[in-house]
Image: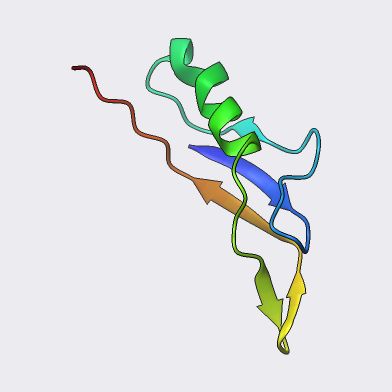
Amino acid sequence: MVEAALDSTGHVEPGSAHVVLSPNHAFDAEALRVVRGSVYRPARLQGRPVGAVIRQAIGFVNY
């Protein structure tokens, strides 16, 4: 589980992403890379885009 602050354009604020829950710390760097590289739909307040804090679950599958 990664927590990050988003700006009003849906991008992760630099330095804001951090792992809050991890079953195996070997996956932490990749989970952070995925969240930092993602663009989210921004939250809205009275119809205007605003910054927000999110928690994003990242799952890994072993093939």
**Looking at the image, which residue is at 78% across and 57% down?**
7
Which residue is painted at 43% across and 42% down in the image? 57
Q: Nearer the viewer, residue 22 or 13?
A: 13
Task: Decide: is 38 above or below 21.
Answer: below
Q: Is residue 39 left or right of residue 31?
A: right
Residue 53, how many percent across, how many down?
67, 55
Q: Position of residue 39 (x, y in %)?
A: 62, 50
Image location (x, y in percent) of residue 2: 55, 37
Residue, far bottom: 46
Q: How is the image coloured?
A: rainbow
Find the residue positioned furthest to the top: 26
Q: Residue at x 65, y 70 (%)?
A: 43
Image x and y of residue 13, in percent: 78, 44
Please give the name of the residue rendered at 46% of the width and 10% of the height, measured from the top-left corner: 26
- Please say if 63 is above or below 43: above
* Quadrant position of the C terminus in the picture: top left
Quarter of the image holding residue 48? bottom right
- Label total for image: 0
Q: Is residue 29 above or below residue 18?
A: above
